[in-house]
Image (cartoon, grey):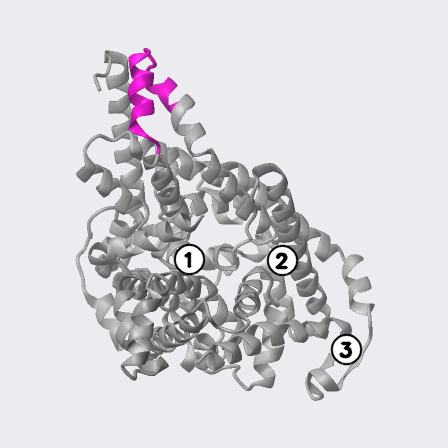
Amino acid sequence: MLIPGLVLVVLFRYLPLYGITIAFRDFHPMKGIFGSEWVGLKYFRLMFSSPDFLRIIRNTVVLNLLQLIFAFPAPILLAIMINEVGRPGVKRAYQSITYLPHFISWVVVGAMVIDFLSPRFGPINVILKALGADPIPFLLREDLFRPILVVSAIWKEAGYASIVFLASIMSISPELYESAHMDGAGLLRRIWYITLPGIRGTIAILLVIRMANFMQVSFEQVYVLLSPAVYEVGDVIATYVYRVGIAGAQFSRVGAVDFFNSFVGLVLVLITNKLAKRFLGRGLW
Amino acid sequence: MKYSKGEKAILALNHVALVLISLVMLYPFVNILARSFSGTQSILRGDVSVYPVDFTTFAWERVFADRLFLSGLMNSTVITLGAVVFSGVAVILTAYPLSKSNLVGRRILTTLFIAVMIFRGGPIAQYMVFRELNLLNTLWVLILPTALNIYYILLVQSYFMTVPDDLYAAATIDGANDFQQLVLIAVPISIPIIATITLFNAVAHWNLYQNAVYFIVETSKYPIMMVVQSIVRSSSSMAEISADTDVGIETYGRETIIAASVAFAALPIIMVYPFLQRYFVKGITLGSIKE
């Protein structure tokens, strides 16, 4: 009974691992993978000395850092805010509304962002024009592109991400709150000294998972908003691999980047898991 | 719990903030719906915010008459249904043996499946493999590779494991074989989780974009999101972004048509959302309970 499952896994997960050897070969479409000549580290050498490479690595890392600093805490804050709402019906309403955007495709969300920031009719620019100022082409500005990515990611994902934190908050014993209240602790103090420490475990685990995915930036989000004007700051590994590697058919050359990416990802996961075991007492497996 | 005056103020502020956040969450949806029913000139002037200006239904009519759009719709429906069925069967078939504690080599096999969650070949490697398997540019490429979501397998497996072994033993004595036990015992118990993953699967496949971009080139095979994206790319906003100043004379009603396409792409999910919301929540909380 396991056979179908095994076949699928082997075919689609393990085989590609072999396909990765394309990075070590001079791929020629006529010859297929096996027929293509083995060239060893040629493309890797090429890759490391390419300015493109530095740019996409830099963008990927910076974007991830920004996400970590701003997009990671946002759901926690949201969860705390929603938790303090008294009436369960209202609470549920806020929850439902905030995690709706998660289920919408980035194609749709991207279109909304593009229109919202449109120089012709985006709300902000309409106001600017009414005040006599020049409209701002947000998505063309190198200095604004990254913040736009982070903010739109928060809009889309914060609600859904807050579910886990909410569940965690709700598992904190109410007695803790009661006794703190009786000891004279005010609302903010209760949040700081009970709620936050109470979800410390959840935060830690999710942080570990986040770190393990450090080199990954969502292809869809960046791709739908990217344009040549902002390649310098917005082109990440995923978009580069697609544009040059697949659409541009430079399989071997970009295959090296792909391989590098997967490899780094693997290393990261292993390291963060080790670290988690050291400091948190448990890892991902 | 009694709150002091100051605390009540903070709580009130909290509500205000949450209301504002909710409005920010909802506004884009309302706006795009309004725009899909508005005259293009009004849109370009920036007049449309929450309700349609210059009400018109022509954009929706045009959208549904467009061949590419309709084929995208067809493709996505096929993909979604196909994926849900195929993946559902595959996940259940895989989770069942793994849930039996007396399976030979269980730990190794489970590790095998989990390991794939951790590292994976990148898109280029996948492209190569699909190429060899002649999957490129077919709808299958959007269904098969993602059919086995390890996360789903683990979820289903944990449900299966709640069935007491005696139940299976009794069934075997009564002459039931493996398949019958799966279908008649394990599955009915796990309906909630199967419903949940079916839902997640459906949403994910309806929203498919990345894999389609990578692996499909023929426009007739485009799923709906690719069609919508190509429409959006032709919008005047995007044209400005791509510094394509040849916008010149706009195709009549372009902005409204774009709004209608985008609104339509989001519609199915929005429509089922109120009814199926609790299943969505279940999915993620089940995952975290595992922690």
- Provide the residue designation for mark 1: A106
Q: Which residue is mark 3?
A: A26
Which amino acid type is marked by label 2?
Answer: Ile
In the image: residue B282, left or right of residue B240: left
Is A183 magenta? The answer is yes
Mark seen at residue A237: 2
As drawn, is B210 to the left or to the right of A25?
A: left
**Residues under labels 3 and 2: Cα distance?**
21 Å
Residue A129: % across, % down: 38, 39
Q: Quadrant of residue B151?
A: bottom left
**Amino acid bearing label 3:** Asp
Amino acid at circle 1:
Trp
**Spatial separation of the CA atoms under disc 1 and disc 3:** 35 Å
Q: Position of residue B149 (x, y in %)?
A: 45, 67
A86 or B154, which is in the foreground?
B154
Residues under numbered marks 1 and 2 in contact, where contact means CB atoms less than 8 Å apart? no
Q: How many marks?
A: 3
**Residue A194, percent from left and from top:** 39, 25
Q: Earlier in the sequence, mark 1 or mark 2?
A: 1
Distance between mark 1 and mark 2 Cα atoms: 18 Å
Q: Residue at x 39, y 40 (%)?
A: A165
Tell me where the magenta segment starts and ends, as one range.
A172-191
Q: Earlier along the polypeptide chain: callout 3 or callout 2?
A: 3
